[in-house]
Amino acid sequence: MKKLNNKGYLLVEIIVASVLAMTIAYFLIELTLNLKAKNDDVFADTILVTDKVLMTNQIMNDINKYKLTKVSQNADTPNIVDLTFNDITKRITIAKIADKYVFQYGVIDSDGYVEGEYYKEFNASLDVSNPLITTSCYENNEFVTCNDTHDKGLLKIVIDAYTLYSDVNYGVSIEIPYNTKDLVVETIKPPDNFTPVISNITERGFTINAKANSQSPIKEYEYYVDDVLKCKTKDETCGVDGLSNNKDYVVYVKATNEFNLSTNSNRVNVTLKQPVSYMYYSTSTLGSTGLYSYNPTIHRCNSDGSNCSNILNLSGYVNTVGGAFGPVLFANSQYLYYGSIYYNNGSISERMELYRCGLNGSNCSKITNVTGYVNTAGGAFGSKVISNSNYLFYTSLDDNESSRMGIYRCNLDGSNCNKIASAYGYINAVGGSYGPMLHVNDQYLYYGSATPSGIVTSNAINIYRCNSDGSNCSKIISANGYENAVGGAFGPDVVTNSNYMYYTSINGTSSQATIYRCGLNGSNCSKIASAYGYINAVGGSYGPMLHVNDQYLYYGTTSPSGIATSSSFNLYRCNTDGSNCSKFASAGGYEDIVGGAFGPTIISNRNNLFYTAVNGTSGRMNLYRCELSGKNCSKIADTNGHANATGGSFGPIVFTFN
């Protein structure tokens, strides 16, 4: 047994010894290779440094020995500099010729080298840059561009040459003091001065066109807008987008040729096109019964509310049990969209026809039919239509058995419409109802949905955020709407600006809502204000008003009580973070004794703020225009809503964009 153990130990010793021997052998081989590589690098470095020194020494000897009368550089012969001494010309060449790098200096004639005072071929991989010849003159203790007033200057001739394994410059670098009157210097010039041309100016951007003349080809253009680099390319055009339409821009282009010589273009001022912008409002006429008609006319005005004219006649929905919703109107910089109730042999239905028109209401073409929701208890809500810069979105009832609405996305021209989601409106057994919330900007689409059942037993609303094309929707927030036992109801609201999302949510069973500010993804929400909706004892109600732009947040609130005794709203303007809120106007809503009610509205474009306020006890409202700060408000029109004897009502439309 011991003998076996001894044999076992002997075998282990042999294996260990073999491994150690192999490790030492590999180490010695690697060391040898590294030393060889190091020696090769040192050898190559020595050769190149020697070439640099010998060539530079020969050139400086000639400069000191002969009178240098001319230095020239030709853009067609890179890495070549000619030095003329009286009657002879000598050439410096550091260039790749065939498969070798050549260091050469000597006398030339029209056919090339006649006599070489220095010649060396080198097989290493070199990165040889095109030569640069620069001149400068000394004035006031600094070097400046030479002109006719200078006599003495400094001439620099630089031809860079680098290897892959060293940071040493093995090329030629010579500095020569010279008399500007005696020496002619012909250098490769930077690109000629030029002026960029601006084309395709839109509301958000433009195209920069640049073409510089140069002795050698342009290697690169750099396009700057307000000193910010927008494009770096060889192309002679650069498209710039995403700019602000309320300011002017300064554009210039830096052109660099293959010799790394650059010229900045002249600066050009660019003013973006003012975006097309209008304000629209609706008004109903007084009927024979003393109530206002559900067939309002649509007026288009300039963006400041001036020069208004009637462009369309539309119809809203009403029934005999108090259900009602108005026509739909929305516009962007390309199209006007509207939805109007469809009449079948003189009878009214909850179906609307959705149209796309020119911004003046002409050349209208039908997109599709959209259906609103109605029930026998007086509950009703219509479709919604909105758009961003790329898509049109609308809602339409999915079926007649529930409050489920389909959300559809189309191209802006109304083509290629597809359902992207479903959302439930809120309904209860006593006529309280409100439709799904829908809001979109160029970043995201937001919508709200109640509990999915025929008669909704909870006024909790789930708020979803999607991509701006309606894809990848996910729930981000839960909010509460308001309902009471006599048919009053209103839902939460969502608005956004460039940086924040704002939403309202009812607290408990009163009409008090909290206004929250969040990130655009629904995160980091904080309470910024409280606002009361309006309710009365006969089912009339409307929620707090909420609007925002990139300068201010606006909201409206009525009297803080469970059953509001006044339909008067106070309108507030705040900073977008919710601070420094101050009242800027009072704006009453409409109510009647049979449950009809609608509140004031507020909306803004880039220059103006608009709001409506009820005039007396009828359905007539005044339309006001203010500065964005809420100051200097003045009445610009009358805008009548609809109200009837059974409690059906809807307010006037006021809409603007840009």
Image (cartoon, rainbow, N blue to C red):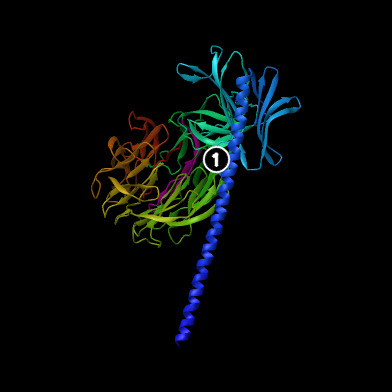
The amino acid at mark 1 is: Cys
Residue 307 horizontal side relative to residue 575, left or right: right
Q: Position of residue 357 (x, y in %)?
A: 55, 40
User: In the image, is 60 to the left or to the right of 383?
Assistant: right
**Residue in front for this viewpoint, 362 or 167:** 167
Q: Nearer the viewer, residue 222 or 443?
A: 222
**The residue positioned farthest toward the top in the image shown:** 149
Furthest toward the right, the residue is 111
At x 26%, y 43%, the residue is 566
Q: Nearer the viewer, residue 12 or 369?
A: 12
Q: Local crowd at mark 1 within 10 Å, few (<14), some, or many (≥20)? A: some
Residue 292 in picture, x, y percent from top left: 40, 41
- Identify the element where label 1 is drawn: strand
Relative to 558, is 455 above or below? below
Question: Magenta stretch containing residue 311, yes or no?
Answer: yes
Q: Quick check: 446 above or below 20? A: above
x and y percent of residue 638 in the render?
39, 34
Drawn side of residue 373 relative to residue 37, left or right: left
**Quadrant (top left, top right, bottom left, bottom right) of the N terminus:** bottom left
At horizontal 74% and vertical 28% (from top left) the residue drawn is 112
Q: Quadrant of residue 479?
A: bottom left
| Residue 348 visible in the current orientation | no
- Answer with the quarter of the image where residue 215 lies: top right
**Foreground of the two, 487 or 402:** 402
Q: Position of residue 319 (x, y in %)?
A: 42, 52
The image quarter containing residue 52 is top right
Residues shaded magenta: 308-331
Left or right of 575: which side holds 199? right
Q: Residue tagged by mark 1?
A: 357
- Res. 239 in view: yes
Residue displayed at 27% across by 52% down: 507
